[in-house]
Image: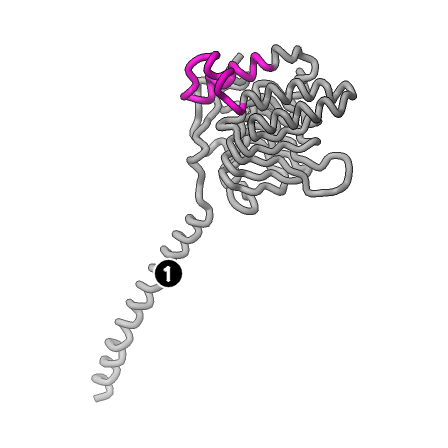
Amino acid sequence: MGSPKWQGTDVPLAGAAEAETASALSVWRLIREDVDCVKSRDPAARNTVEIVLTYPGVHAVIWHRLASRLWRRGIKFPARFLSWLGRFLTNVDIHPGATIGRRFFIDHGACVVIGETAEVGNDVTLYHGVTLGGTSWTSGKRHPTLRDGVLVGAGAKILGPITVGAGCRIGANSVVIEDVPPAMTVVGIPGRVVKPMADRRRVGDGRIDLEHHLMPDPVGEAIVSLLDRIEFLEARLAHLQSERPRGRGATADEAA
């Protein structure tokens, strides 16, 4: 139950979260899965009691599960009050209208914001400081959708009604404002797709790859390429300059 249903490098289908929606399950079953999944994603988690009592990210998800049920039954103010209480106690702000899938984990739960129309698939992991925010005053869909198996690094901002495909990794402090295809890695401000899943480290035992610090540096790679080119051109120029006096001397001798 704690590990994702997709194994190895197989990417879950975008929309797999809709196959068995969280709203169709018992809230207690959802909470049980949220607690159990921590053991497979946090090496520091030792036992269930410790997770339940000391993990603010888990507490925030529990508060949201309860508030979301009230919200979807039309009991708006109590839902908002529970959401506020959860934010007061955990420093994680999840609007009760947000759709959260199964086995959702907020690691080091702090300063996470998830907007009203955000949709989060199954087996998604967020680190501290992540924002799933809106960019418009208009009603309707204005927050992002994260498909199954997405991992979002600390401090990343995903803004607007965009879709992040299944199995993607978002680098720490990235700002994502455009759709991302499945199984890609995104870094930078604004976020750029830099690495497909085929080029990433593979996890063969079904666990989620948490090594989100192993991100490519496209700017650094471009600078290195430019430096190599400059070094080559300087060497070529020095060679041509060394040849010019020798050529002129030969001409003078021939003339004599």
- Report the front residue among 112 and 252: 112
Q: Which residue is mark 1?
A: 230
Q: Is residue 247 above or below residue 156?
A: below
Residue that protrudes farthest toward the bottom in the picture: 256
Q: Residues within 10 Å of mark 1 (few under 14, many from 20)?
A: few
Give the answer, above or below, for where 230 lies relative to 63: below
Q: Is residue 93 left or right of residue 171?
A: right
Q: Residue at the location (65% across, 28% down)?
A: 84
Q: Mark 1: which amino acid? A: Ile
Secondary structure, magenta segment, majority class: helix
- Residue at x 67% of width, y 12% of height: 25
Residue 227, image x and y in percent? Answer: 37, 56
Give the percent coordinates (x, y) of residue 72.
75, 21
Left or right: 116 as drawn, with respect to 44: right
Residue located at (59% from left, 25% from top) = 148
**Does residue 251 appear in the picture of this structure?**
yes
- Magenta segment: does it hold 56? yes
Q: Quadrant of the C terminus?
A: bottom left
Horizontal and vertical percent position of residue 217: 44, 44
